[in-house]
Image (cartoon, rainbow, N blue to C red):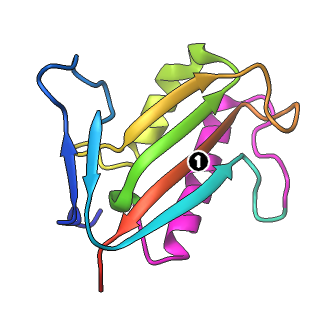
Amino acid sequence: MTDQPTNIRFINPPAIAPAPGYTHVVEVTRGRTIYIAGQIALDQAGNVVGPHDFRAQTRQVFENLKAALAAVGADFTHVVKLNMYVVDISQLLALREVRDSYVNTVNPPASTLVEVRKLAREELLIEIEAVAHLPEQ
């Protein structure tokens, strides 16, 4: 993983309870903001990866995010916000394990996790959207 961009500051105010695996406040200055649509567990051919396997789907979602970031010259150190939607919140430990193998765990992005009744397709178990920020060049 590359060094953290200097135009992004990660802050956990002491007046707010400690954040397990995410940051409460991310301040961004100068540069380009990148919005990545919700990614689901589809491979390049459009096939669902791991129809009943939460961990496999989560890995595919993060691989899709990685590819989307690379398309604009970014990586996970540039991610400032993740919005995660799952159909089963009891899978939180697996989500955290996979997420932590991709994001900068020293300065993790601000995050939101929501359990939903269902996603766009019945076999999908997780969807994640991201916001990234690139410094001025």
The residue that label 1 is drawn on is: 129
Q: Is residue 122 above or below residue 57?
A: above
- Expressed as whole percent of the image width and height from the top left, the position of residue 79 reads 40, 55
Say whether residue 102 is visible: no
- Expressed as whole percent of the image width and height from the top left, the position of residue 88 reads 66, 18
Residue at point 27%, 25% (across, down):
19
The quadrant in which the C terminus is found is: bottom left
Q: Hey, which residue is sitting farthest front in the picture?
A: 29
Magenta stretch: give its range: 46-75
Say whether residue 121 is visible: yes
Residue at point 35%, 44% (across, down):
109
Residue nearest the viewer, comparing 3 with 24: 24
The amino acid sitting under disc 1 is: Glu
Q: Hey, which residue is sitting farthest bottom in the picture?
A: 137
**For mark 1, does the 10 Å Cα neighbourhood hold few (<14), some (14 to 19), or many (20 or more) residues?**
some
Q: Is residue 56 left or right of residue 98?
A: right
Residue nearest the viewer, comparing 94 with 111: 111
Q: Is residue 99 above or below residue 73?
A: above
Q: Hey, which residue is sitting farthest right in the picture?
A: 122
Q: Is residue 5 left or right of residue 62?
A: left
The quadrant in which the N terminus is found is: bottom left
Residue at point 53%, 39% (across, down):
83
